[in-house]
Image (spheres, helix red, strand yellow):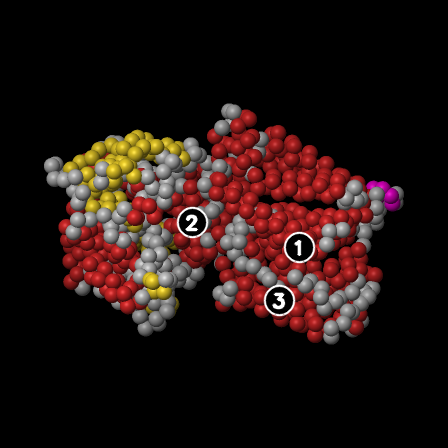
Amino acid sequence: MSTILEMRTISKTFPGVRALDNVSFSVKEGEIHALVGENGAGKSTLMKVLSGIYPIGTYEGDIFFHGEPVAFNGINDSERLGIIIIHQELALVPLLSIAENLFLGNENAKGGVISWQETFQRTGDLLKKVGLKEAPQTLVDRLGVGKQQLVEIAKALSKDVKLLILDEPTAALSESDSQTLLDLIVELKARGVTSIIISHKLNEVRKIADTVTVIRDGATVSTRDARKEEITEDGIVQDMVGRSMENRYPERERRAGGTLFEVENWSVTHPEHADRESVKNVSFNVREGEVVGIAGLMGAGRTELAMSLFGQSYGRNARGTVRIRGREADLSTVGKAIASSLAYVTEDRKELGLILDETIERNITLANLPGVSNSGILSLQEETRVAEKYRDAMRIRTPSVFQRVMNLSGGNQQKVVLSKWLFTEPDVLILDEPTRGIDVGAKFEIYNIINDLSRDGKGVVMISSEMPELLGMCDRIYVMNEGAFVGELSAEEASQERIMSMIVTN
Amino acid sequence: MTDSASKENIQSEERSVLEYLGSHMREYGLLFALIAIMLFFQVVTDGTLLRPVNITNLFLQNSYIIIMALGMLIVIVGGNIDLSVGSVMGFVGALAAVMIVQWDWPVIGAIIACLVTGTLIGAAQGYWVAYWKIPSFIVTLAGMLVFRGLSLWLLAGQSVGPFPASFQALSTGFIPDFFGVGRPNVFALVVGAIAVAAIIWMGLRKRAQNRAYGIEDEPQAFFVARNLIVAGALMFLVYKLSTFRGLPNVLITMGILTIVYAFITERTTLGRRIYALGGNEKAAKLSGIPTERLTFLTFLNMGFLAALAGLIFAARLNTATPKAGFALELDVIAAVFIGGASMSGGVGKIIGAVVGAFIMGVMNNGMSIMGIGIDYQQVIKGLVLLAAVIFDVYNKQKQS
């Protein structure tokens, strides 16, 4: 098998940071090559060097494609050779159709006049190749994230892709959408497309990758060939963090107290379609010191449930009762929900959780400004003291609390969001995908924080699409599907198979 | 680099000073720009710019812009814009003229009625923006047309005036010298000295508190230099004013409002929440912040300040004309952006808006003294606005 890509001794320095240090990386033609490593290890930087986003001259080292030395001045140069990168944040225009998106910047046009017939015909062919059953005229806006990923891949195919780079393609996808996507990547391999896939999900990596390269602190740590040796998740994790991680889910003494939080017959309708119920008659409870999981596929209504409980931030016509420590609670506004000692850590921390342009300090105090003020007048020193306290307690890695949040890594950002909510001194915390998009090391720290909360007698509701995480962390798991709860499992009973079968059979 | 950079390198004093300057480029840059522009015009106008009578004029001419810039900064920080302020200002001035001159209302009653009217206008516009989510650009563009038309209607296309002396005092009055000397006005000097002492005392207190909490502050040399410049400039201006007619009433109004709004934006939960609202409305809402009510309040406040500016403007001209306030919203908005506010909200400071307004004001005044035509004046002001924003964007890119 010949080598399609070779990157030799690549180094790249940002002001004050050596992001890549003599990285060598080679990919064989026709394989699926997984690139793994903690956030900030340098994976994305390496891929940006490869795709020309960081042009020649801004890094040291050489790149060979099909054995020829190449130098890219921009993404157009690399695309011309068939190297196409699909970023984690999708680059589609929501209010244009699938067809328009596919050929954006590359239209089927003569003299600037678009031939729609040809466009739609080619779109139809491409969609068939990626297995997406949608009309070419459908607006991208209407598609879920999973289908949008497929559109991105179709777009790559339209450019005659030779080497496809996917940056965390399944991070925002449900299990079934992930599966579809992974199948597609394997299928593309059969058609001769080489892929590099950056992923945090090691089970997926193990399933589809032919070769796994681990990067840590800007340097290549190991490259393993699945065709020659068996690749284990533990082995990869060990390379990623530089230490063995015996147990990915820290132990916690399980000791649930009295009932803390009860929801009874909770229903909410869709904000635009009053006849559509997003949450149907849901009842559940959380006891003191308990970590309760809500499992389900993407779109099962878990976020909708959480947000509607938290000050009716989602949907309309919320019905049902909520009791906290046996007393009926009024959660009709976010302010009242916070006052009832409820906290909700959102799924989308950049859009909904943080003010990226503001400092760590100001983000931490935002939900409880009265806690650092006196009759409406802020004590700036007290505010700094509080922020420093959480920085130490949560191990937020930053030189100072005056750093802007946008400069932090995903894991540290998540710790800032958690700090913000802990400062409101809640009794019940709803954590919506608390470890999405953060690396193994930071995940472990978040799990420890969750265990600490449980030890302090707080009730934690954990929504997650990663089933192993729920199985590893929760005392009880509720299973949600199509807006309704379809089952409840204790930690002993629960397994991925049982959860899936509950979803499928209901 | 942010403040943190300086924190880590306390050892190498020199480097930390440079880094501190780099991270606060915007704030110092603005102050330096104002000083440089003033010196430039002082030289090219052969000393006319800083003559006592001209300094007095500078304050009188720019008072209404500055007062509106305070409100506009808050609206823009909240993520909106108000295009109607010029028209509202003109309308309120016209209303005052009609009430006082034509209907013989007592001055104080008319002033209160006018302020209430302005506040209601702000509330009406804020209602649509906040609770109906109609873009502020559109609502206030409509407001701009409506109140421009209503001023014309109210004045029946005529100028109405003159006002009684008690109303004119709003703008052209001076605080008498309680010490009886007259010239120089000792009272003005005393007020200036007290202000300087207060600024230094508050600065020292903040440094002491920061040290007690272990928070790194600006380098000592900077603190001293900045305070010396500010104190020197303030005493210089006050001295000049004292040799003319003393402190204009409107300067006191402006000064107090600036302090109040700076305090609200920087030191209160209310102010902090407005920054959060502009920074990320959804995140603010999910943090329990009543975003709608705050947006509403920013416009209500803007209406109040536009009304106050309208009264001062009418008092200064001693007549209300249908053209009063025409296109003034653009000067106000330009001042706020020169002062470092961000179009997307969440960023900007009161003091920046005030300095921005003074930069515009000094340029207007200086160029007029030089006899530069209105045509070139507009071109130069436009370029200065563009340059200030480019400077901002450049700085931001360098940081990241």
What amino acid is labelled 2 in the image?
A: Leu
- Secondary structure beneath dot 2 equals loop
Examine the rendering and report whether any part of residue A119 can be seen. yes
Q: How far apart are marks 2 and 3 (CA)?
A: 35 Å
Look at mark 3 in the image and give the residue it sits on: B144
Look at mark 1 in the image and give the residue it sits on: B378
- Secondary structure beneath dot 3 equals helix
- Using the image, determine if residue A444 lies above or below residue A277: above
- Using the image, determine if residue A243 lies above or below residue A363: above
Look at mark 2 in the image and give the residue it sits on: A354
Q: Residue at position x 54%, y 26% from top? A: B13
Q: Which region shows up in magenta?
A: B182-186
Judge from the rendering whether residue B76 lies leftward or rightward of residue B115; answer left or right: left
Q: Are marks 2 and 1 on the same chain?
A: no
Percent from the top left, x then y, of residue B47?
79, 41
Q: Nearer the viewer, mark 2 or mark 1?
A: 1
Percent from the top left, x then y, of residue B73?
59, 53
Chain letter of the residue beneath label 2 in the structure image: A
Examine the rendering and report whether any part of residue A289 can be seen. no
User: Looking at the image, is mark 3 or mark 1 earlier in the sequence?
Assistant: 3
